[in-house]
Image (spheres, grey):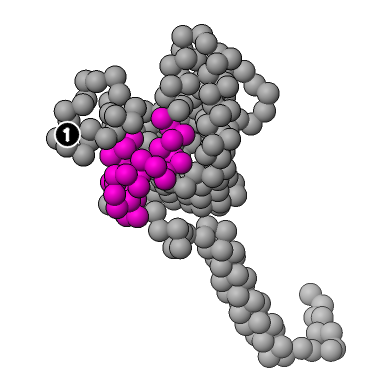
Amino acid sequence: MVLELLRLKFAPPGQSSDRPSAPLVADFRAIFQRDPAARHWLEVLLCYPGLHAIALHRLAHSLHQHRWRLLARLLSHFARTLTGIEIHPGAQLEPGVFIDHGMGVVIGETASVGSGTLIYQGVTLGGTGKETGKRHPTIGRNVVLGAGAKVLGNIEVGDYARIGAGSIVLRPVPANCTAVGIPGRNICRSNTRTCPLEHGQLPDTEAAAIRTLLDRIEQLEVQVKTLQAGTETLPISLTPEPTHPH
């Protein structure tokens, strides 16, 4: 693996697409595409736990597919101890996935992550209970999962979707949408292909709903005061009106 990654410094793009190590090549290049702090290939090779975790996972996943389940789990456990990133050997990661920082990331057994996806620290792709079969999320391509986000259950997150930091997503997220909040709410007003996930400028759906309610209450209070003022100005007679016999 190390020799293959070292070869990248001199290999033109696309040359390794048909080699067995092509996923590792894509993982390596994705770091330079997504992380402005990546300055030197040797720094990335030695100091990026996300790259280490994914490289070890690809080996563990191969062992898992060939039914060397115990050895695969041992390798996964070693990777978790080394990097702080836990990826079940059964999880499927397409080439070009980037785990930035990575501490506390958990990816479940039946999870699937598309190429170009960016995963920040503390992200969980988990299940919701003791169900069997497909019980973990399917993440599309070029998705951004913000720090501390939890995507739970057998749900789909579409291509170019954005999951805000700290969100808990329990329902599917369409392509090109942003999900924020607890539980996650989908906001599809912007084009996420051209707009990056600005963690400091995430829309606050709860605050917007509360603001709408407060505005409506203020309008109703004004109407009530207007009606009360109109009632007070009406003449009030204390004596009954005389009745006229027919």
Q: Residues within 10 Å of mark 1 (few under 14, many from 20)?
A: few
Which picture quadrant has residue 207? bottom right
Q: The C terminus lies in which quarter of the figure? A: bottom right
Q: Vertical placement of 118 versus 241: above or below?
A: above
Q: Nearer the viewer, residue 112 or 73?
A: 73
Q: Vertical placement of 167 versus 78: above or below?
A: below
- What kind of residue is marked 1? Ala
Q: Vertical placement of 213 versus 101: above or below?
A: below
In reply to whether residue 51 is colored magenta, the answer given is yes
What percent of the width, then of the height, locates residue 19? 24, 20
Which picture quadrant has residue 25? top left
Q: Residue at x 17, y 37 (%)?
A: 10
Q: Residue at x 57, y 21 (%)?
A: 73
Q: Nearer the viewer, residue 17 or 177?
A: 17
What percent of the width, then of the height, locates residue 60? 48, 21
Over which residues does the magenta segment extend? 26-55
Q: The N terminus lies in which quarter of the figure? A: top left
In reply to whether residue 194 is colored magenta, the answer given is no
**Kind of element beneath mark 1:** loop
What percent of the width, then of the height, locates residue 24? 33, 30
Q: Residue at x 44, y 40 (%)?
A: 50
Residue most extreme to the right: 239
Q: Is residue 207 left or right of residue 40?
A: right
Q: Residue at x 46, y 9 (%)?
A: 66
Q: Is residue 144 left or right of residue 72?
A: left
Q: Is residue 246 left or right of residue 192?
A: right
Q: Is residue 158 visible?
A: no
> Label 1, on which residue?
11
Residue most extreme to the top: 67
Q: Nearer the viewer, residue 156 or 188?
A: 156
Q: Is residue 219 visible?
A: yes
